[in-house]
Image: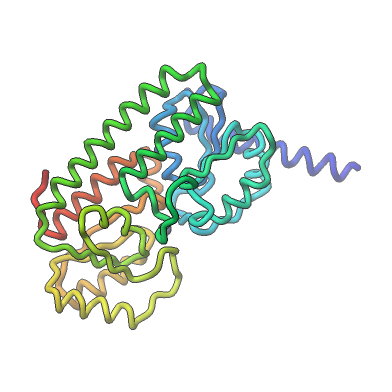
Amino acid sequence: MKKIVFLLLTLLILGSLFWWGVKRSAPSVKTEPRLVVSGYVPYTLAKQIAGDSAEILMLLPPGAEPHSFEPTPGVLIALNQADAFIYISDELEPWAKELAQTVGARTQVLALAKSFPTVQDPHVWMNIQQAQLMAYQIAALLAKIAPQNRAVTDENYFKLASELDDLQTQFSQALATCKYHEVVHIGHLAFGNLLQPYGLTLTALSGTAHEGEHSVKKLTELIREIKDKQLPAIFTEESVSPGLSRTVATETGVQILPLYSIEHISKQDFENQVTYAELMRRNLQSLTRGLICQAS
Ligand SMILES: [Zn+2]
């Protein structure tokens, strides 16, 4: 009996430490509603919509990749104290699917890509239109669980929706003018949904999940492709060792440009609360330079 009481007390303390951590990083937040989100994509969208009217706990720490995650007991407590748990999809985050099955009745569960048509690439938010649908779902959830904050969250949502409309126009205008139409990415296959609406193709070093080992054969194929097509640039991402893209660049003489999958966020960008639209504008800047397009 004593053992059980001790275990429960430990879990309660761990749970409150989680929320305390959130409060400490943002001292002005009010106490409700409490949202738990899987990673940076739902975090940044929810943050833009809720502002300071909600506490938001992001499970994946900055620097981690979303395809795998080991939840601690404190996560389970925080989840059960939350008003909502938001994640992207069972396909992208199988660990979040398991967590969603453990929550109690008070916690609403929202899998943002659940209503999207089944796609092979789970990085659905890289399509701006789908990111807009995700933002809408978050705004609707907030209106339901915290109707008292609706004036603020509705206003923030409309601002975000309009920012995403502008972003889409910028992408359409700039990417319609490119000299090259092929993106060679020294990273994982996360950008197909971003490029496909603009008629651009993607070849990546690894598949849709982050794979530890990269094959020399694939790297050699990419180098041949860059030389054959005389591409001026390659693209890479923060979660991949810079040595790989440097090897390709040395071999081919191309420039290296960064792309941001947003699911992976650096500590610095997290501290600066860089938004979805800001990261996408960085992507547009890289694509415009690397594919030789006219900046809008
Ligand atoms: Zn990914």
Q: How is the image coloured?
A: rainbow
Indicate the quadrant of ligand 1 in the picture: bottom left
**Residue 269 appears left or right of 150:** left
Residue in the image at 39% along x and 51% along y: 124
Asked where in the image residue 79 lies, by quadrant, the reply is: top right
Residue extending furthest toward the front = 117
Asked where in the image residue 78 lies, by quadrant, the reply is: top right
Q: Measured along the vertical axis of the image, is residue 293 above or below residue 167? A: below
Residue in the image at 38% along x and 79% along y: 215
**Residue 116 appears left or right of 103:** left
Decide which of 165, 246 is in the foreground and name it: 165
Residue 171 appears at what percent x and percent y?
20, 46
Residue 151 appears at what percent x and percent y?
42, 17
Residue in the image at 29% along x and 62% along y: 236
**Residue 228 appears left or right of 160:** left
Residue in the image at 23% along x and 64% along y: 183
**Residue 152 appears left or right of 76:** left
Residue 95 appears at what percent x and percent y?
58, 54
Image quadrant for the N terminus? Answer: top right
Image quadrant for the C terminus? Answer: top left
Residue 165 appears at what percent x and percent y?
25, 36
